[in-house]
Amino acid sequence: MNENINSGTGLTNDLKDRYLLFNIEDTKYGFSLEYVLEIINVPSLTPVPGVAHYIKGIINLRGKIIPIIDVRLKLGLPEREHDDKTCIIVLNIHDMQAGVIVDSVSEVVNAENSQLSVPADFGEASSRYLSSILEIDNKIVLNIDCEKFFSADLESQF
């Protein structure tokens, strides 16, 4: 599995209303497609001492060193063994790349403003990273705000 999602051809305005959906346990989450570069299988990770517990290590992806964050651990959920559906979503935030380990990727969806709502602030890690809640096909999707999710990590850790 090595899918290139966003070729970086200036399509970011078209991608803002599209989301890559992924699963963590029984919950669906989404990343705005404007940040998504590709989806890869989980390779061998090189651990880095002294970083946050949810940063599982780094990988060399075509000559670029990329930190890998376990979404489960960052959201305060228990770690789990990787299986054949576990993958890494490679994201680009302000010209910095990072990968996130997710249980599985499901689909790309288009979202209209009428399907999006502002999330309630529960003060927990899982809700403070949300940009919106999407209701589509009788499913609730928690959309993660990439800027908030990575703000502390990319600048202070690497």
Image (cartoon, rainbow, N blue to C red):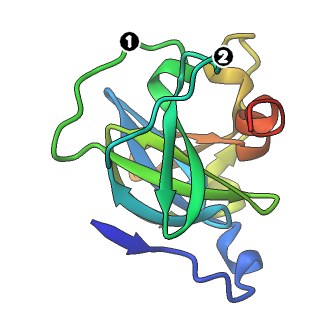
In the rendered structure, find residue 52 and report the number of the disc placed on it.
none
**Disc on the earlier residue, 2 or 1:** 1
**x%, y% of residue 45?**
40, 40
**x%, y% of residue 52?**
63, 18
Front one among 7 and 131: 7
Q: Is residue 91 above or below residue 4?
A: above
Q: Quadrant of the C terminus?
A: top right
Label 1's element? loop
Q: CA distance from mark 2 to mark 1?
A: 14 Å
Q: Amino acid at mark 2?
A: Ala
Q: Is residue 22 above or below residue 120?
A: below
Q: Amino acid at mark 1?
A: Pro
In the picture, measured across the screen, residue 117 lies left or right of residue 62, that is right
Q: Is residue 3 above or below residue 36?
A: below
Judging by the rendered image, the residue that carries numbered circle 2 is 125
**x%, y% of residue 151?**
81, 36
Q: Quadrant of residue 82?
A: top left
Name the residue located 28 percent from the left edge and 21 percent from the top edge.
80
Name the residue located 49 percent from the left edge and 74 percent from the top edge.
5
**x%, y% of residue 48?**
56, 28
Label 2's element? helix
In the picture, measured across the screen, residue 64 lies left or right of residue 25, that is right
Contact? badges 2 and 1 (CB < 8 Å): no
Judging by the rendered image, the residue that carries numbered circle 1 is 78
